Image: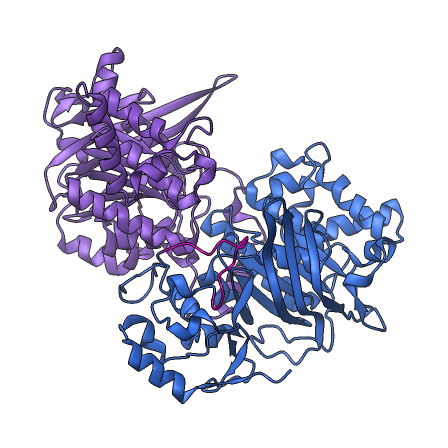
Chain colours: A blue, B purple
Amino acid sequence: MSAGLGGPVSGLAEPGGHGRFAGEPVLSIRDLSVVYRTVAGDVRAVDRVTLDLNAGEVVGLVGESGSGKSTLAYGATRLLRAPALITSGSVRYQGRRMGIPTDVLQLTAEQLAGLRWREIAIVFQSAMNALNPVLNVHDQLTDVIRAHLPVSRQEATQKAAALLDMVGIARARMRSYPHELSGGMRQRVMIAMALATEPEVVIMDEPTTALDVVVQREILGQILELKDRLGFAILFITHDLSLLIELADRIAVMYAGQLMEIGTAQEIHHSPAHPYTKRLLRSFPSLRGPRRDLTGIPGTPPDLLNPPAGCPFLARCSEGTDACKTIEIRLAQVRSALDPAHVTACPFVLPDDAGTVDLDGSAIAAAAEQHSVEELKP
Amino acid sequence: MSSQGTGVAPTGAAPAGLVSAAAARGTLTLAAAGLGKDFRLGHGHVLHAVRDVSIGLYRGAVVALVGESGSGKTTVARLLAGQEHPSAGTIWLDDQPVQLSGRAAFRRYKSEVQLVFQDPFASLNPAHTVRYHIERPLRLHRDRLTREELAEQAAAVMEQVRLSPADKFLAKYPHELSGGQRQRVAFARALAANPRVLLADEPVSMLDVSIRLEMLALLDDLRDRFELAMLYITHDIASARYFADEVLVMYAGQIVDRGPAEDVTQQPAHPYTQLLVRSAPDPDNLGGALREVARQRNQDGNGSANGSSSPPPAGACSFSNRCPFADDRCRAEAPPLLQISPSRAAACWRLDVAAPSVYVRREGGGDITN
């Protein structure tokens, strides 16, 4: 990137251009599987996940606790340690600064050090734990900058000040320690640190979950604005689907270590295909519009130590059939969708309102025969 | 209220003349008027955590207390639960002023008024089984039970929160349970005391989105079955809309907006309530609204909403430093709760500008009390 911080970056997503990204994938996750090795056996945390993150795009990864969403992100960046083990897959990274694509999973420790932060940065959920309590903001920021960029002490200080301006923290707070900052300000410092070396990919793991709604909203707005300006891509991990619909360009829904559905935010909002996505959408109370009947999702996710055969959501699915007990989960295109990239793991895609009607077995069998999905070509 | 003396029936559950939207459900069970709590911070500084809060909990009804962290919500719950001594104000249980002197009185009060905490990972003792957590309140709050009766009642309480088979769950330790199951145990423990008032402090905010609704539905079912008078504390105003009869919005220790849940969430009167409602995710406005927030904040050029701007001057409206409608009066004099309609009130001098549609109703709704 030739332009400095805050400068316009040409050839990237236009500001405000929501969902219109012709960008090449910067991060291509292919068939990634991660297990946690325990005495009782392997816990299959991430199971053959394939996901692309395009340049300048916000991809939301949504799922409940234990669905493997964080393991997927940390696996793709090689941040996991034993007993976690990557058992299959590849993660191709191609940044604008790097000529040829690299497979993150094949890099040596030294090569990885060059990739992390410089190319791929992470904002963690708990800023209080992620910041060093005995270093002030200035020292933490310049530490990162000098570790990754060939700059002098003065240049690093200037850059730190520019970064604080960018995330909306007064320069006077430069000498503050983490405990002297509010939760929102700490999270802003974390974002400033992640952006310090102008990375191409920023992974955000529930960065605003611990914050008040008002502050959360300000920070999300700021993240979008910075993304528009600097052109990095975001993988945003959360359990809050309503937030993602507003924030993300595309949404990937994860359940029990597998992807259940991928689609644009609009497709997921207006025509969700997978029963799990439909139930998730009906799980949160809305403040606007008429009051709706809320259903929630009774039951709990399966034990990944002994994952059930067939569809992992079957036990909680109101639309399940006998066929679901044996099917092999794979993402297939939703034929009725406007967007060819809208894929679902449920082969029995029913009309949108299907989640609200009780269908008997024959209706589902009929729908299955019509087969509104076709398999995705590799 | 203090002029009436503490022995007088609690008309102070709401400012004079205001009818709670929760009153339609049942009789007034727990009431507080002019409740205040100061914390001494040292060096002569005092934190007014709660100021002049009046609240009424009615049988079979839910009152929601909504606000940001640090607004004093939890302190109100602790005051109502008898875990803090109020610096000002009175609490009544069934028309009787609450006097918690001595262990016996406190225990009697606890068997009527129970508190459920936010974090089921911290509120259960990891060294004890579920059985211990459930049988202890049964022993304390119910009349002498035989061993068989104790086991029977423990199982009954577990069934009430739908943890069945009860025996299987009673034998488990907290770490063997999921977050939702732990919170059910916390509910069961509260129910074991056979209370009439349940104070739930953010009971679902630590849980996954997919099970929050289930837990709220369970709470609603318990409220209905046992005619519990319930206080629901939350920072999620959307859940208050669905779950509560009356919503009280708290800011900086005071109630700034109160009224029927649907009214407060659909027609917020106080500028802070408006900010809260605006901050809820809006799926129908993809990205645009978020970017607007950032743009505005950059224009203002200060960290208006994250507390980095200067605090309001002493005696001023506590929201005046963040309020887009604040004028000289707001910066000089704090507004009391002003009645807008029979069941609605807001603490704002500038309602005519901030919420014109609500203000019209005030003109027709009678005169201002307080």
Q: Main secondary structure of the magenta part?
A: loop
Q: Position of residue B297 (x, y in %)?
A: 54, 56
Q: For this view, does A149 lie left or right of residue A16?
A: right
Q: Nearer the viewer, residue A192 or B132?
A: B132
Give the farthest residue toward the top.
B102
Residue at 79% across / 71% down in the picture? A96
In the picture, the quarter occupied by the N terminus of chain A is bottom right
Residue at 57% across / 58% down in the picture? A237
Q: Magenta stretch?
A: A299-311
Q: Is residue B254 visible?
A: no
Residue at 13% across / 40% down in the picture? B17
Q: Position of residue B333 (x, y in %)?
A: 35, 37
Q: Is residue B315 above or below residue B293?
A: above
Q: Is residue A150 above or below residue A16?
A: above
Q: For this view, does A351 lie left or right of residue A133?
A: left
Residue at 25% across / 34% down in the picture? B191
Q: Position of residue B209 (x, y in %)?
A: 42, 54
Q: For this view, does A93 lie left or right of residue A242?
A: right
Q: Is residue A39 visible?
A: yes
User: In which quarter of the view is residue A54 placed?
Assistant: bottom right
Q: Nearer the viewer, residue B125 or B250?
A: B125
Q: Is residue A187 within the magenta segment?
A: no
